[in-house]
Amino acid sequence: MKLNKKDLLGIKDISVEEINFILETADSFLEISTREIKKVPTLRGKTIINLFYEASTRTRTSFEIAAKRLSADTINISASTSSVAKGETLIDTARNLEAMNPDIIVIRHSAAGAPHLLASQVKQSIINAGDGAHEHPTQALLDMMTIKEKKGKINGLKIAIIGDIAHSRVARSNIYGLTKMGAQITVAGPATMLPRDIEQMGIKVYDKMQEAITGADVIMMLRIQLEREKQNIFPSLREYSQRFCLNRGNIALAKKDVIVMHPGPINRGVEISPDIADDLTQSVILDQVNKGVAVRMALLFLLAGGHE
Amino acid sequence: MKLNKKDLLGIKDISVEEINFILETADSFLEISTREIKKVPTLRGKTIINLFYEASTRTRTSFEIAAKRLSADTINISASTSSVAKGETLIDTARNLEAMNPDIIVIRHSAAGAPHLLASQVKQSIINAGDGAHEHPTQALLDMMTIKEKKGKINGLKIAIIGDIAHSRVARSNIYGLTKMGAQITVAGPATMLPRDIEQMGIKVYDKMQEAITGADVIMMLRIQLEREKQNIFPSLREYSQRFCLNRGNIALAKKDVIVMHPGPINRGVEISPDIADDLTQSVILDQVNKGVAVRMALLFLLAGGHE
Amino acid sequence: MKLNKKDLLGIKDISVEEINFILETADSFLEISTREIKKVPTLRGKTIINLFYEASTRTRTSFEIAAKRLSADTINISASTSSVAKGETLIDTARNLEAMNPDIIVIRHSAAGAPHLLASQVKQSIINAGDGAHEHPTQALLDMMTIKEKKGKINGLKIAIIGDIAHSRVARSNIYGLTKMGAQITVAGPATMLPRDIEQMGIKVYDKMQEAITGADVIMMLRIQLEREKQNIFPSLREYSQRFCLNRGNIALAKKDVIVMHPGPINRGVEISPDIADDLTQSVILDQVNKGVAVRMALLFLLAGGHE
């Protein structure tokens, strides 16, 4: 089988078969990162550019490690030290990079749709590493991989997503993906953080976190953007955490074997209590990070033309 | 043949034979970037340091890709994250790097002459990646390579350079190089942006862009530094673009088969109209970027001791 | 023999035998950096993360070059472009990195004890690349390596350390190391820059630099942090340099064959006069930098499980 796509732009546009194929490929790469010599020559002589217009540790590092473990050459470009500052348009930057013959451009950008624009303009493969409040497809893939590993399946699971749904690219990509895979999704968050059209997507929306997580197999907590407090999107961090922080009390409403997810970086005591975050019988937050490298290895491999 | 030079500091100091030799070597490297596996082991075990005191996307990325395709190890140092901030002198920084046994130091610096100072102080090869308003020799080499490919020769061509000649290291290096190679150069720009002594270099200077580009085989547009507007070096961007923007109207004065060049990043609608920049029957702006990787591969190879 | 340690956190906690073993291993790596092909496959497939919360040129570059000459993959994370800015705790950052299966994390942090905290929390090897005013063990190791090479031994030497002893991690690590190795240490500096408990460590403390360096085999000048002037820790740079600048006059008090050391970056004319810094019959400042790469190669090798 082969991934018949030039780009990975979002979860909305890929099929269940493609998701499963990516996750199976990722599974087969998982073991490489545990070897004594964590490197295979698969992408030797390929050039991967990480073009990050927003600060990032984990996503950029994860892509860079994934590329290096496949023996690709990696080039990091961050907006702050680049001629982006000189006012060049995104498309001109991309066309210039294209002229240097990279194989894949990984882009993170604050504007929704930026990766799609690039993909339509350059012949290289584009991977969306997060675009505004739109999509973060590799995060959703690593989340699905983690759920499949822990629960054996996604179909039929009850999955609660809690927090700032409206502004979260992680939530959006996961809602597309998990719905396709047959999960039943509930969400909860402050009214100002819930998208209006979300019930049309087959999602159950609750005011109270407690209702959303009752009986859940999976609870996915979202990071609250601390800077939103100043924008008056929610009253105060204190009130937010009283209503939407996952803790020992409310987690008891979920299934006994519930798993707790978070895309990181976590705000301890705001959206998740430290004891929940650190309880490795329930928290799979670090498993998510671990799967992230394998998912990115799989995508780099598949988009660079690899197939089994 | 061999390049009998320790450093590449400027085009002023190299001969026509050396330019031709570098361009021929670059030609032979061009094909590597189009291979399935874009990498040769030529510089394995060599250390290339990119020491950038000014922000840059394309030049730094181009050098880094060039080095990696030759299997060299690359180290990026940018002023903002380095101990440069601690007030160390340039020479002390360079001597410290020298003590770590790199093979080549690529330097960009806002001070004219900085690479020459380094070259006199350290035993490693220095490549000037742009020094103040002085020289940008790799840009001129990739420009000459592009012209030779598109026109078959440089000798006898009429080449117009338009814009801020006085403050442009790209213009200066190209004037040295193209003159040596036998081209006839005309320039135009605002009076405050024309160096006084330029006619002594055998260059024809015009007030009006139209006069400079009439009958031209090549038009090289320079980037206007937007920050110069505040320095009152020219009246306004609007006036500048009315007088010096290359567009469908004035380009008709050039030869039918004129090619349009620009070192990038371009200011669309300021020094070049978008339709001209994007018309690939005339614009060779992305060819220039593409040749840049090959020229830098050639220089890294030749200065690191390679010969055919 | 083998280094039976997971981490290198400080010189305080390692034995004379361990120091000697690291220095001997470093000696054996010194030659690699002088080869035509400066690279050995020893750490192929290992991942080294440089996690720098403070700006650095020489230390980060030295670790990166060391790793690359051993064929390890290197990932640079600097606080300014990372999600550190998003308020994640140090431990959460480290655990996230841990989940990506690196082999060694090299950390520089402004907080004393940060590397120790990491070492207790993650399974990977941690190397302290400088923590606050606490320790900078790789600097002390390269200093000891330089002294051994130049003097043939450390035991019995008289070594003067001059400057801001209290706030210097370089001084602290060297005092631990050189004392263990049998040197007799004298220090001098402004009263506000001398730690109170230092005489209990067997160190002779002098007000006057002249007394401390009289008869010295080695003079180690410390960098004065220029920002301390504003904190009123010393009266003025001018007065500091009148009292504590090493120059042609006062160096005559030391042994004839004294060597002069400095961890860099140097403040010319403040703590060291330019003619002393540049006199290669006495100054070994650049030898220190050169040894730094070998010491770091040795540590990466030994902590990644290598043994002879």
Image (cartoon, coloured by chain):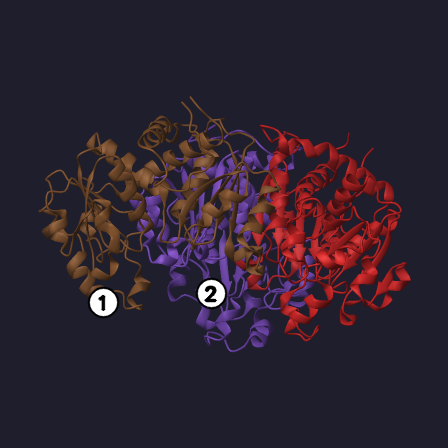
Chain colours: A red, B purple, C brown
Q: Residue A48 location, x and y as percent?
A: 63, 43
Above or below, B139 against A36 in this view is below
In which quadrant of the rendered view does residue B134 lie? bottom left
Figure disc tally: 2
| In the foreground, B288 or B303 | B303
Q: Residue C298 location, x and y as percent?
A: 40, 31
The amino acid type, in three-letter code, at marker 2 is Val
In which quadrant of the rendered view does residue C215 lie? top left
Above or below, C97 against B69 in this view is below
User: With A287 as the anchor, is C176 left or right in this view?
Assistant: left
List the residue tagged with mark 1.
C236
Q: Residue C77 location, x and y as percent?
A: 52, 49
| In the foreground, C176 or C75 | C176
Q: Which mark is residue B205?
A: 2
Q: Chain of mark 1?
A: C
Q: Nearer the viewer, mark 1 or mark 2?
A: 1
Under tag 1, what secondary structure? Answer: loop
| Residue in view at x 76 percent, y 69 percent | A190
**Whether residue B154 can be seen here:** no
